[in-house]
Amino acid sequence: MGGLFSKKKEDGPKRKQLGKARQNDEEMSDKDKAKFDLRVAKKAITKLTKQVEADVVKFKEKARQLLKAKKKDRALMCLRMSKFKTKKLAELDNQMFKLESMIMEIKSQAASLEVFNAMKVANSAIKTIQSRMSIDDVEQLMEENEESNAYVQEMSELLGETVSEDDEAILAEMNALEAEELNAALPEAPETSLSDQLPVAPTGVLDTKVAAKVEEKRVMVPA
């Protein structure tokens, strides 16, 4: 039982859709039928126009032949028929103009109908959006947006200060490393004192040869 009732409930929207589809089909069929009938009429007028034009040429040519044969009465009759056919051509041209105007009017009305339907759908969509987005909601959204912007700005400022402190710490660390490198590049201090590195003065007796040379140099120097 429940399944049957549920099917009936589901069939409701489907019937509405089918009704709209049939209505659209009827509108399209009427428009297409009118265009088809007008095109058929155009073809008929075009065919008749060609036939009448041929008749005009034929009656004029026959009138010439009758004039050569000295049959003026019959030639006059042919000229009258040619004149009548010429007037008929003007009427056919007028009918063709009316048919073309009607076809253009149908196309214009069809385009206007499409524009109307599109505007109707757009208007419905706008109303739906407006119902979902009230003025109060927009004002609340703007306030929340301002709060979010203020929060982001505050966080940016805090992050900027943190970055500055980090930069100072990094610079201090770099200076310490440079000092270490400079100390490492200096030569190491000697373990012994400077007096230990000087040569030791001799304490023994000079060699006799060295003493003789020293004495010789002393004698040679004038007083």
Image (cartoon, helix red, strand yellow):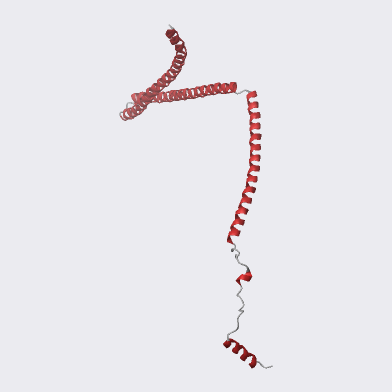
Residue 198 in picture, x, y percent from top left: 61, 73
Q: Nearer the viewer, residue 69 or 129?
A: 129
Residue 180 in picture, x, y percent from top left: 60, 56
Q: Residue at x 65, y 48 (%)?
A: 168
Work out whether 146 lies above or below 9: below
Q: Residue at x 66, y 29 (%)?
A: 143
Q: Nearer the viewer, residue 130 or 56?
A: 130
Residue 144 in picture, x, y percent from top left: 64, 29
Residue 43 in picture, x, y percent from top left: 38, 24
Extreme residue toward the front, this view: 204
Left or right, 165 with respect to 20, comes to: right
Extreme residue toward the right, this view: 223
Q: Residue at x 66, y 43 (%)?
A: 161
Figure label count: 0
Q: Quadrant of the N terminus?
A: top left
Q: Nearer the viewer, residue 133 or 84?
A: 133
Q: Nearer the viewer, residue 27 or 37?
A: 27
Extreme residue toward the left, this view: 69
Snapshot quadrant of residue 196 = bottom right
Q: Residue at x 65, y 40 (%)?
A: 158
Q: Quadrant of the C terminus?
A: bottom right
Snapshot quadrant of residue 94 = top left
Left or right, 141 with respect to 57, comes to: right
